[in-house]
Image: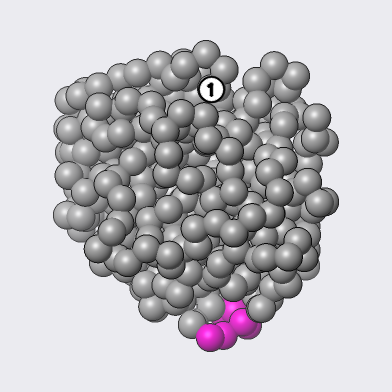
Amino acid sequence: MSKRVISAALSAFVFLMCGCSTAPTVPSVPGVGPGALPAKAKSPQYLYVYNTGSPGLYTGEYARYTLPDLKLQETTVADGAASPVAFGIAGLPFFVDEAPQGGFAVYLQPLKNGTVPAREQFYGVPCVSSSLATGPTGNFYVVQYCSGNVLEFAAGARKGGKAKKPIATYTGGNLTGTVLPTYATVDPKGDLYVGDNGGGVTYFAAGKTKGTIAFATGQSQAVTQMIVDSRGNVWSTHYPNPTIVYFKDKKTCIPDPSGSIKRFEGAEEFSKGTLLKQLYSSTTDSPVYAAGGLSVAVDSLGRIYIGTQNGSDEGVLIDYDPNTSCPNDGLSFVLPTRAFPQVAVDKEKRFYLTDYNDNAISAYSGGSKKLLKRITQKTGVIDISSAAINP
């Protein structure tokens, strides 16, 4: 059994609180690199769900499901402290997990059926990672909460059993002192965005390793997810206790410091390192009010979904019409207790929601409450902590 190592960044997510499980023990072998397949050979879209498992009972598992029918195709064993998946330029999923050689490694989840072992691509990652990102060249960007930076590693598997060394270290911007990275993503131009434990976002233009502040830290708790939408813009959402924003009335979505209506700032949109838009919660007296952003997804028409958890322990799916900053309460809805919802969208604009407590996954028609499919994961595949769909 491998010793569970969880950073403070991960411990902020209560749904990740689990114990030891077995890490991949496959030897370092040449795998399918992120650029191994031509773009035209990209695989169909699948939903990838990471389950942290239960200490001494069930291992962590990455599960792959077909869309939209949610049929389980594959499971891959992982440690309970592995990262969410990131997709290479061929659409294949990679993740960071403990390495048998010591420290941590980047693994590939092969596209096969059944129970499939992960393929180690390289080791040499110093410590646990709450986030892995990939760039347009296939390089890997690994968040290192323990050292307060992000490390870049060249694409491809490392042969010969030697640790791979990073080719760049990203620091600066918000990332100073006690401000530490929790999530990262890279846009199509190669610009890196890094969220931190104070809700801030640091921007690194392609080729630059010294960051600038895109969104100042200290306005909320940890950034919980960052994504890139179909236009190449970056979105960030963060954990509870975000900034209170006042508005003139419930119909107005323009902040007014003299107003009395309270909403909470819950997500941000960026382009070229510039803040474009902020998203706000429903009003505090709304039945679909929730302030704790856990996950965010944006479809090809610009409709936004945020999976949240409110103070009464209910999950809430918040729906935003395109080009708006305040929710559509009529299309938002409350989820079961302790759902800790992870949300993702596919190319057909359907959205998918996970339910941590019920160990379930649901598919919905986009921009509606119409449930298309709901499944319960098989025995032993439990404790959903992240979900993603390949491009």
Q: Residues within 10 Å of mark 1 (few under 14, many from 20)?
A: many
Residue 17 is situated, as x and y percent measured from the top left of the image, at 68, 30
Residue beneath disc 1: 381
Indicate the amino acid at tag 1: Val
Residue 82 is situated, as x and y percent measured from the top left of the image, at 64, 43
Residue 364 is situated, as x and y percent measured from the top left of the image, at 23, 30
Residue 24 appearing in the image: yes
Number of numbered discs visible in the structure rendering: 1
Q: Considering depth in this image, is 238 or 210 the residue closer to the camera?
A: 210
- Establish if 114 lies above or below 141: above
Q: Considering depth in this image, is 387 or 335 the residue closer to the camera?
A: 387
Residue 185 appearing in the image: no
- Residue 32 colored magenta? no
The magenta segment is 207-212
Q: Residue placed at 52% from the left, 29% from the top?
A: 115
Q: How is the image coloured?
A: one colour
Q: Secondary structure at mark 1?
A: loop
Q: Residue placed at 17% from the left, 54% from the top?
A: 301
Q: Quadrant of residue 389?
A: top left
- Establish if 358 lies above or below 341: above
